[in-house]
Image: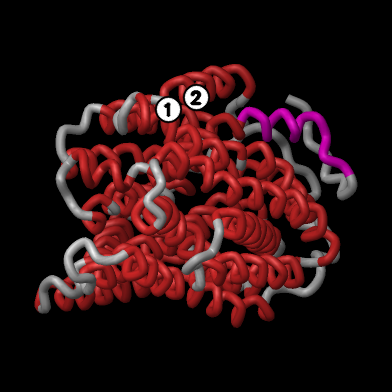
Amino acid sequence: MPAISSDVGRIDRALLRLMGVLLVGASVALLDTTIVAVAIADLTKAFDTTVRAAQWATTAYLLAMAAAIPMMGWLTDRWGARRVWLATLLLFLVGSMLCGLAWSIESLIAFRVVQGLGGGLILPLVQAMLARAAGPRRMGRVMGLIGIPGQLAPILGPVLGGIILGSLGWRWIFLVNAPLCLLALALAFRHLHPALVQRPGALDGIGALLMVPATVAILAGLSLIGDLLAVPIVLLAGGAVLQVGFVLHAVRRGDRALLDLRLFRYPSFSVATVMMFLSGACLYGPMLLMPLFYQQARGLPVAEVGWLLAPQGLGLMAGLWVAGRYADLAGPRIVALTGTVLAGSGLGTFVFADGASLTVLSAALVALGAGLGGIGVAVSATSYRDVEPASIPRATSLLTVVQRVGASFGTVVVALILNRYLATLDGPGSSSGIDAAFERTFAWTLGFLGVALVIVPFLPAGPPATDDRHPETRTTT
């Protein structure tokens, strides 16, 4: 396959072809996330469980993704990105089929872990391969371009999810992944070629045994607060100890660690990592809340809810397009600042949603989506500007793990807070009481954006001066 030029002003045909091939696979993971978010209420009814239990169908998926992502650097070094990409898509396909056959909430959560182990590598592989092919000077535009068609999946996800849930039932929200997975596999066999050089290394098993249980224990402890006293404390304390152990272990091993913490020596990468955590919480927390808000607080059927959530996807697509054009020219800081203010205005509308019309709420979703899109592009443009090309896969692993942990944190915290507010209502409660419960929960997600606003000034103010670290990149993967 021909080399991709590092010409700052041009995104050539070879890079566009690579983007198209990877986009099909990325759409599988994106579509799955938004479809399942709409189905939380249906899952609680189907398995006769609570929102706090059903949200673990999302949280388990995110945690499995977080567990798989650190393996990306080692896997791609050992077998090459093409083989890992194919194996990832196949595992995601198997997990989706198993989820469609689940017979209880426990089995669904277990199968979502299988699906998450595959899905965890899809998006970071896309990001790593495109970052290596584009270089930091074109990263903002590449993320903006791939984001526009890529966000058709989140737009269609809620709509398709509502249609499926209203006609075929919840099992088909997983079975619908099969055609896209098969298409992505066929395109990868045809267009992706193995890299000429592979550099196998040893897997950091100790790091995996420390980090994964630490993350699960902390999030499980948070989700159990309010039910039991001793168990959450033990889980949180144990998770913290394991996390400290992982950090000490990773620092000692350097670039041979499961996650290369030496990357934090780059200030731009450190700031981008914090923003990645917060953006994950700000995206997935509201993603859990929105469908429940429309169904429980506004009493709307699930088929309508899907259409009502589509404006967020439209806003996200617009935000990616605009931010992708300006992040490389104006610098990440102003793009992230604008995005944070926009997203805050959108979430703020839901904090004071009592009596707001559906038109106003839809406009708020557009603002929220556009803001999150701007933040995402700004963080991506910042992440790789000082990182050596050889370290891009490991940088992507670390960034995506942080985002998935942030997403899990946002989901668990939002489910916990909403459940506690709803529990204070007497019986079914009045509609105003349910509205208040959701508004207070939305206020917590607005708090995440408030923290992000404090971090934004530390992002780089201008674009990178040169592209010397990436003199030539190729589409071989």
**Vertical placement of residue 8 versus 439, above or below:** above
Q: Is residue 41 above or below residue 464?
A: above
Whether pointer 2 and pointer 1 mark residues with C-beta atoms closer than 8 Å, the reply is yes
Give the side of residue 16 with respect to residue 98, left or right. right
Q: Residue at x 33, y 49 (%)?
A: 58
Q: Amino acid at mark 1?
A: Asn
Residue 356, picture quadrant: bottom right
- Residue at the spot x=29%, y=53% of the render? 55
Which residue, given by chain and number where applicable, does mark 2 sit on? Answer: 180
In percent of width and height, residue 286 lies at 46, 60
Which residue in the protein does label 1 denote?
A: 177
- Give the secondary structure at mark 1: helix
Residue depicted at x 34% and y 31%: 96
- Number of disc labels: 2
* Residue 271, image quadrant: bottom right
> Looking at numbered disc 2 in the image, what kind of residue is underneath it?
Leu
Residue at disc 2, secondary structure: helix
